[in-house]
Image: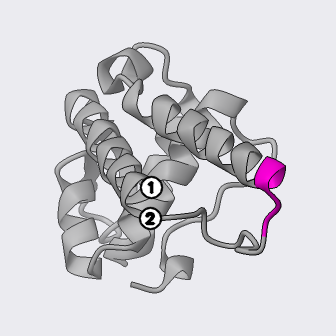
């Protein structure tokens, strides 16, 4: 899918932990077929509409349990991909031994961070801005 179809994250719109989770979800969904990504988000985002103007949402319900599951699925998928790859994309492969250790340390920290993401715990402290971001992703794919 075109990475631009999923909503970008506005700088400063989210606090760092949520920003990282939003970036994780954006990456995960962007690597799916568009219909598969829409199906995932359709299980999470349920807009309620009025009949006067079609497709005008007046209230959006978010299934936080399903969103927590999606976060965990995305984290597991990206962590597994990192384990399979030999280096982080975008890094020079001609690294000195010390630079190589530094990249490996960073890669290990990223994998550990991803493996420790708890979707339910993330949902217990979700902000309105994060919920709005997920809703925007849904609408970007849906319409």
Q: Residue at x 30, y 71 (%)?
A: 54
The reply to whether residue 104 is in sight is yes
Q: Residues within 10 Å of mark 2 (few under 14, many from 20)?
A: few
In this rendering, the count of numbered labels is 2
Q: Report how far apart the C-alphas of labels 2 and 1 lie in the structure.
A: 5 Å
Classify residue 46 as left or right of residue 114. left
The reply to whether callout 2 and callout 1 are in contact (CB within 8 Å) is: yes
The segment highlighted magenta reads: 95-99
Residue corresponding to mark 2: 85
- The rendered magenta stretch, by its main secondary structure, is classed as helix
Q: Which mark is residue 5?
A: none
Q: Residue at x 17, y 64 (%)?
A: 39
Classify residue 134 as left or right of residue 62. right
Quarter-of-image position of residue 10: bottom right
Of 61 and 101, the residue lying toward us: 101
Quarter of the image that includes the N terminus: bottom left
Residue corresponding to mark 1: 82
Secondary structure under the numbered disc 1 in the rendered image: helix
Report x, y in % for residue 111. Answer: 48, 39
Report x, y in % for residue 131. Answer: 47, 38
Report x, y in % for residue 135. Answer: 43, 51
Q: Residue at x 31, y 52 (%)?
A: 77
């Amino acid at each position: 899918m075109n990475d631009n179809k999923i909503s970008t994250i506005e700088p400063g719109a989210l606090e760092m932990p949520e920003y990282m989770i939003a970036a994780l979800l954006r990456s995960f969904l962007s690597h799916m077929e568009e219909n598969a990504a829409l199906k995932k988000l359709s299980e999470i985002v349920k807009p309620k509409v009025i009949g006067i103007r079609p497709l005008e949402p007046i209230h959006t319900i978010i299934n936080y349990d399903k969103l927590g599951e999606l976060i965990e699925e995305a984290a597991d998928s990206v962590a597994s991909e990192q384990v399979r790859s030999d280096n982080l994309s975008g890094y020079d492969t001609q690294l000195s031994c010390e630079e190589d250790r530094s990249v490996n340390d960073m890669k290990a920290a990223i994998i550990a961070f991803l493996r420790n993401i708890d979707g339910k715990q993330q949902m217990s402290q979700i902000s309105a801005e994060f919920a709005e971001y997920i809703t925007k992703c849904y609408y970007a794919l849906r319409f």
